[in-house]
Each structure stands twice: as C-alpha cells, then as structure tokens.
Image (tube, helix red, strand yellow):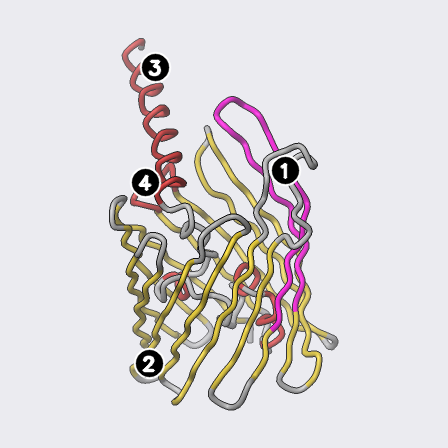
Amino acid sequence: MKNFILHHRVRLMLISGMLCCCFELSAGNDDIPPGARASGMGGASVIMPGVWANFGNQANLALLTRTSIGIHHEFRFGLRELSATSIAFAKPAANGTFGLCYSVFGYSGFRQSKAGLSYALRLFKGIAAGVQLDYLGIFSPDNSRANACTFELGILADLNKEFKLAVHIFNPANIHYNGKNGEAIPPEIKMGLGYKPIESLTIIIQTDEKLGGSPVFRAGIEFGLGRILLLRTGISSNPWENSFGLGIKLKNVKIDISVRRHPILGFSPACSIGYEFP
C-alpha cells in the first residue's frame, strides 16, 4: 500500500513538472483551439467554418445553415494527464446563429476549463461578425481555484470569390483571474487570410500575438480527393511544429484526425467527430 501511494505521488510530481515544461517550451504555440481540422493545418483556425468556430472565430458560425454538434479529444504529447476534451454546438436561427461550447484540459490535480455562449450574424453581404461570453476556470495542485468571466469577438470578410480575411480578439478588456490582482489572462489577437483558388484546395496563413508575447505564424493547406477524403498539412512557429491530418465526410457525419509534432515533447494526436442535423 505504501509503495502504491509513493508511486502515485511520484507520478503526480512528474506530471506537474511536465505541465510546467509543456507551458514553458511551447509558450507561444500552445493555444490551438479544439478541432482536428485546424490542428492538422498548423492551428490556423481563424477562417475555419463549422461548429468549431465556437473556439476559433465566432464570426464563422454565421455561415452555418444547419444545426451542428461536435466532440473533440486531443492526447497532448501522448499523455492522458495532458489530454483535452471539448464539445461544441451551433444552431442557425432567423436572425443569426447561436453557439455553445465547453472544453477541459488536464487531470484531477490540475485542470483548466472554458465554457462559452456565442452569437454570430451576417452584417451585410460579405461581412459576418460574432461575439462570445466566456467563463474560465483553473484548479491547481495546491487545491486553489481561480475563475474569470470575459469575452471574445471576431469578424470575417469576403475580399472576393477567392480570398477571405478574418480577425479575432480574445479578452480585449484584459480581465484577470479572481479580479485585477489575480493571474493575468493575456489578451490575444489573431489575423488570417484564406485563399481558395479551386473548390478542392484551401490555403490559410495566420498570425497570433498575445500581449507581452512573441508572434506565432501559422500556415496550412487542405486538398480534397473527391467528395469524401480531405488531406491536410501545416506548420506553426515559436517553436516550429509541423502537423498532418485528414478528413472524412460521410453524409451528415464529419470525422477529422490530426497529429502535431513538437520538436522536443513529441506527438499530439487528436480526433474530432461532427454531426449536422438534416
């Protein structure tokens, strides 16, 4: 029994150290929103349509025409204790699209969570906007808790038939956990350009920058093989990672699989399953 308790404590210490190492080594590149489609394209999510726009850029929700739901899971660096699970829902209505999302990262000794309520609409031809209210929570190894309420917003613009431009801002009010004297939640701005020269090819470039941090560059390519299979690859900086993925469309069901490779910490596989109601 003593050996079991000692083994468990050592394991928790190793995982806690891994968490610190994870955040330190990937400080600029660890904020990839849920959704294996974007993950397979270097994390370039700001122009991604679909239900995962609840996390990437809420303005894209305005493009949805059918009620959608999705679930996502990522084994970050192949460790169960560093895994993340997310769920998202979106429902188009007469005056816009409503969305709900929830994500949780970590394990029983350290856990981060996020819940969001979003709304998106088309402002006029070629322009869409979205906003989301967020509740953020942290449970840390010393049994302390922190929480905050903030918001994020985004805009999407069709420059022409081939190009789209998007901007997304998270926590523009610079809200902290547990008030002004608590841990900072760095505001972040993301800007992306999408290029779709033909129906089967999508190219996205994006830059992310948190307040006080270094910019992150992302780029991804998606190529369709027929109506069912999609192949993806991408890169991201700070540190440099490469990613790969594929998507499968089966009537109302979409399955996306991705793998990201960190130069030091290794591979992070992820899978998303989405369903669009008829």
The residue labelled by disc 3 is 5
Residue at 56% x, 36% y is 138
Residue at 39% x, 74% y is 249
Amino acid type indicated by mark 2: Gly
Q: Could you say where residue 54 lies in the image, as x and y percent from the top left?
A: 57, 61
The residue labelled by disc 1 is 177
Of mark 2 and mark 1, the one earlier in the sequence is 1
Q: Which mark is residue 244?
A: none
Of mark 3 and mark 2, the one earlier in the sequence is 3
Of mark 3 and mark 4, the one earlier in the sequence is 3
Residue 142 falls within the magenta-colored stretch: yes
Measured in 3D between alpha carbons, the distance from the residue under mark 3 to the one under mark 1, in whole angstroms, is: 33 Å
- Quadrant (top left/top right/bottom left/bottom right) for the N terminus: top left
Residue segment shown in magenta: 130-155
Q: Which mark is residue 79?
A: 4
Measured in 3D between alpha carbons, the distance from the residue under mark 3 to the one under mark 2, in whole angstroms, is: 51 Å
Of mark 3 and mark 1, the one earlier in the sequence is 3
Nearer the viewer's eye, disc 1 or disc 4? Answer: 1
Residues at discs 2 and 4 in contact (Cβ within 8 Å):
no
Nearer the viewer's eye, disc 3 or disc 1? Answer: 1
The residue labelled by disc 2 is 224
